[in-house]
Amino acid sequence: MEILQSAAALQAQTEKWRREGQRIGLVPTMGALHDGHLRLVQAAAAENDVVVVSIFVNPTQFNNPDDFRLYPRLPEADAALLGPAGCTALFLPSVEEMYPEQSKLRFDFGSLEQVMEGAHRPGHFNGVATVVSKLFHLSRPHRAYFGQKDLQQVAIIRQLVADLSFDLELITFPTVREADGLAMSSRNRRLSVEARKKAPQLYKALQLGVRLLEENRPVASVKNEVLQFLAMEEAITLEYFEIADARTLQTVEELTQPQEVALCIAAWLAEVRLIDNLLISAKSL
């Protein structure tokens, strides 16, 4: 596995692969890798000739300076995991390399970014779209791989690909979970022992919501019961729980057929913010 630290080196390498007819898979990450990341890398290796994994803690997508400062950074440990998983080249740039000048471009994704994560993290998706655009331009992948846990991010990137005509296929993989249901996340490393014990309640809340929807309960009633369930756990500070159209991310008041809906949650456990979601098809209700 080769480690590339400059944009020019990455661009030269991917252009060489393109000339040779190699198909390129890209897995963008912010590091502190877990099994969810590695499964994306393994899938990319199985479906492409070469795989680029980027590790870059992108400052422009953090609206909380402490969150950026405390985000786990483990480049040596991450590099040791990537080779065996099938990574061909690790792109490990500095902030100065990715942003030689402050970006003046501003993305507006309309209703897609006015709900949930966008509503609670102003500027977040502008930062995501900026860095992902840079990575797409530099690596020119045939396929790019993302996890479903960041459902709204995937929707934003899907729109980005469509609007800017990026010539690539966007692949989304299901959320990978711990044995107790907690969605794997780099931020899980920051949970205290006690908070880690409470964190699976978020998944249980989503499962409760799905179960109630399957009983044909009204959406408003489902949301109310889930909120009551979460209120019983003092360690959890809920930021939002929404039932939304899985593609537009707009809140649904009642289910129609056919429709895929997403149950989405964000909550704080002490100083650690976690998100999760579950998808369900109205056709199955």
Image (cartoon, rainbow, N blue to C red):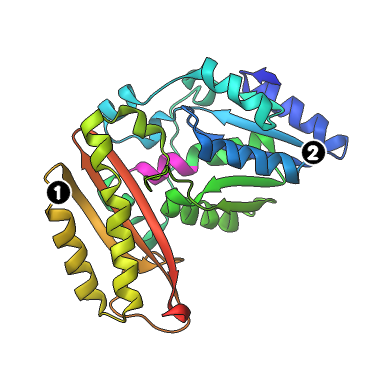
Q: Which mark is residue 49?
A: 2
**Residue 115 visible in the picture:** no
Viewer-proximal residue, 82 or 126? Answer: 82
Tell me the residue at 43%/69% (across/down).
280
Look at label 2 and name its amino acid: Asp
Q: Which residue is mark 1?
A: 233
Q: Is residue 209 magenta?
A: no
Q: Is residue 124 left or right of residue 138?
A: left
In the rendered structure, which amino acid carries the disc numbered 1? Glu
| Vertical side of 188 occupied by 278: above or below | below
SS label for mark 2: loop
Q: Position of residue 172 (x, y in %)?
A: 56, 53
Which residues fall within the magenta stretch?
123-129
- Picture residue at 81% right of the left edge, 37% below the top: 18
The residue that appears at 81% across and 33% down in the rendered structure is: 17
Q: Nearer the viewer, residue 88 or 19?
A: 88
